[in-house]
Amino acid sequence: MEIIIIILAFIIATLTGLFSKKRSVIEFFSVAASLIAFVESVIAALKVSFHGAYSSTVFFSVDSLGAIVMLIIGFIGLAVTIYSIQYLRKETDKNVIGFKRVKQYFILLNLFLLAMFLAITASSPIFAWICIEATTLSTAFLISFYNKPSSMEAAWKYLIINSVGLLLAFFGTLLYFTSVSQSGGTGLVSWQLLLANVSHLDPLLAKIAFIFALIGYGTKVGFAPMHTWLPDAHSKAPAPVSALLSGVLLNVALVIVLKFKVITDACVGSDFSQNLLIAFGLLSILIASLIIFNQKNYKRLIAYSSIENMGVMALGFGFGGLGIFAAILHMIYNALTKSALFLSAGTIFLKYSSTKIAKVKGALTALPVTSILFLIGFFIITGTPPSGIFLTKVYILTAGFKSHPVISIVALLLMVILFVGFLKHVVAMVFGEKPETVKTGEESIWLIIPPVVLIAVVLCLSFFIPPFLYNLIKDATLHY
Amino acid sequence: MGIIFLTLIFLHLTKKNFIATVAYAIQSFAIVIILLNSFFETGNIYMYVVILATLIIKVILAPLFFNRLIKKHDLVFSASTYLNTPLMLIIIAVLTFVANSRKFAPLTGIIPANQTLLSLALSSIFISLFLIVNRKGTLSQILGILSLENSIVAFIVFAGLEQSVGLQVGVIFDIFIWIIIAFMFMSMIHKHFGSQDITSMKNLKD
C-alpha cells in the first residue's frame, strides 16, 4: 500500500508541474509528495523491521535492505526538494533560469524520485531495470539543466555510458532467467523466483551473467573503470540534483547488484562475486585517491569521494561477515553526508558563482554556517574519528585483514592519501581572505536547514542507531 | 540473424548518415520478423502488441526522427572513426571469432539447436559495442546503442528467454523515450557545438 501512495503522490506532483502556471503551487505539491513519500518509507521500514519482508502487490516487494534504501530516498528526497525551492529562486533572481526551467526541474525531480522508489521496490528484475533506465532518462535533462556546452557534454557522456552499461545489465539479467525457462516457469519472474530456481542455473552461465550485471549496474554505481561519467555529471548538474545522484542513485544501483550477488552466491558460492567486488572496490578507491589531488573543481572533488565510498562499500560486501554490516551502515552515513556536502557546495556556488576551487577563498568569512557544515561533512566523509564512517571503515578493514590483509593495508593507505588530498582543497576553500566582491552572510535560512538536518542525523546515527533500523541492518547483513 | 549481423558490418563501413539509418531500419525489420516467427512458435496472441510496437517505434519512427535531424542540420556524412577500415575489419573478425569460441559456450549453448544463431547474436552484441566506441559521430553512437539493443533482443528470442508481454512493452516504451531524448540531445549538441563530432566536445577539462 505504501508504494501505491508514493506513486500517486509523485504522479500528482508531476501533473501539477505540467499544468500549473503558479510556481508556489508546483513547489508546494513537490514538497508534499516528498513528505508523503518519506512518511510512507518510514511506515514501510517499520513494517519490515517488525514483521519481515512483504509484498504489497505482485509488482512490488520490500525487504530489509530495500526498506533502508527507501528511507534514504525518502529522507534525502525531502531535504533536496525543500533545498531546491530556495536554490532555484536564487538562480531565478540572478536571471540564470526562468519559470519554464523551474517547471521542468520539478517535473523531472519528481519523476526521478519516483523511478528510484520503483526500482528499489520492484519485485521483478526486468521491472527494476526499466526503472533504473527511467532514472537515466529523467536525470539526463537535469544534468544539462544549465544548457551550457559543458553541461550538455556531461549529459551526453552520462546518457551514452549509462545506456551501454544498462544494456549490458539487461543482457546479464536475462541470462539469469535461463533457470526459470529450464524449469518451465512462465509469467512475471521475480527475485524470489530466480532464487528458488537457482539449482537449474548453469554455474558457468551464472558467473557470466553476474559479470554482465556487475559491469552494467556497476557503471551506474560509479565503480572504476566505468566511473568516467560520474565526476562530469555530478559537477555539471544543479547541486540538489548532484546530492540525489551521489547520495541516493548510486546506492539504488548497488542494491540491484547485491540482489544478483545473492542469486550468484547461491549457485556458485560466495567467493566469485566477493572477489569481483573486492577488485572493483579497490580499483575505485585507487582511482579516486590518485585523482583527488589534482582536482580544480570542488563538486568534482565530492564526486570522486563518492567513487571512493562506493569502493569502500564494495570492499565491505566483498569481505563479507562484519564487513557487510559495516558496508550497509556506511551506505547510510555516506548517503546523508554526501548529500549535505553537495547542498553546502550548492550554497557556496550561489555565493561565489563558480565551482572552481581557486576562486573560492575565505568561505568561512563569507558563509560561516555553510562552511562549518562543509568542514564537518568533510571530516565525516573522510572517516575522521569519532564519526560513524570512521567506525565503518575500521570494521570493513578489520573484516578484510583476516582474509585479504594486503588489500586491506593498500585500501587503508589509499584512504589516508584521499584524506590528505581532500583536506588540502577544503583548507584552501574555507580559510584565507575572501574576495572583496563576495558579500558576507548566508544566502537564506532555507539553504542551511536541509544540510544541517542531514548532518545532525548522521551525527546522531554515529552514536545511536534506533532499534528498528538496527533490526533492518542486521537482517540485511544476514541476507546479503 | 544474418541480416542483423550484416547491417552491423555495414554500419561500421558506411560514411553516409542516411544510409546508416536505412541499415538500422532494415536491422529492426529483421527483429520484427524474428519476433513474428517466435509468435508463430509460441502462439501467444499478446505478442502482437510487442511486434506492432517494435515495428512502429524501431522500423518507422526512429529512422524518421533521425532522417529529419539529418535533413535539418545537413548531416549527410557521418563523423570519422578512430580506427582505419582494415584495422576495423580485423577487430570485427576477432570479435566474431571470440563470440564463437569455447569461452562463450555456456552462452551460445543455452539452446543447443540454436547454437549458430546464438553465436551470431553474441557476435552482433560485441560488434555493436565496438561500433559505439569506434565512431566519433553522435548519430553513429546512437545507432550503435540501438543495434546493441536489437542484438540482445535477437539473443533473447533464440535463447528462449522472452519475458511477459507487459514487461516487453515496458522495455520498448523505455527505448522509445530513450530515442526521443537522444534525438533532442543531438539537436542541442548541434546547437552548442555546430557539429555532431564528439571530439569537438572539449569543455570538461577542469
Image (spheres, coloured by chain):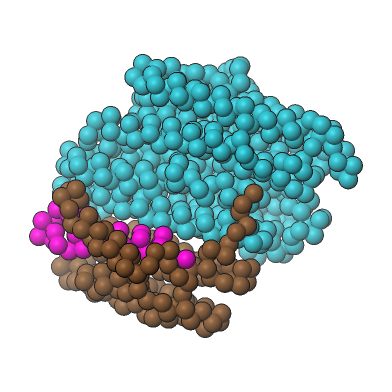
Residue at (36%, 24%) from the top-left corner?
A: A320
Q: Residue at x 21, y 45 (%)?
A: A205
Chain A drawn colour:
cyan
Between A475 and B95, the residue placed more toward the observer is: B95
Task: Answer with left or right where residue B7 lies relative to residue A376.
Answer: left
Quarter residue B130 falls in: bottom left
In the picture, one chain is brown; tell me its letter: B
User: Residue A94, relative to residue A427: is it above or below?
Assistant: below
Query: In the drawing, does residue B125 fall left or right of residue A147?
Result: left
* Magenta-colored segment: predominant secondary structure: helix
Verify whether residue B126 appears in magenta.
yes
- Residue closest to the eye, A169 or A153: A153
- The C terminus of chain A is located in which quarter? top left
Query: Considering only vertical position in the picture, is A29 above or below A320?
Result: below
Residue A336 sits in quarter: top right
Q: Is residue A104 magenta?
A: no
Residue A85 pos. (x, y %): 72, 49
**Residue A212 position within the rendered picture, expressed as x and y whole percent measured from the top left:** 32, 47
Residue nearest the viewer, comparing A416 with A158: A416
One can see residue B73 in this view: yes
Nearer to me, A57 or A389: A389
Q: Is residue B98 above or below residue A350?
A: below
Q: Residue furthest left?
A: B113
Where does residue B109 sit, x and y in percent of width and height?
14, 53
Q: Is residue A374 above or below residue A103?
A: above
For residue A182, side relative to residue B72 (left or right): left
Q: Which residues are magenta?
A: B107-136
Identify the residue shown where x is 26% and y is 69%.
B5
Q: Examine the rendering and report whether any part of residue A325 can be seen.
A: no
Q: Position of residue A113 (x, y in %)?
A: 55, 48
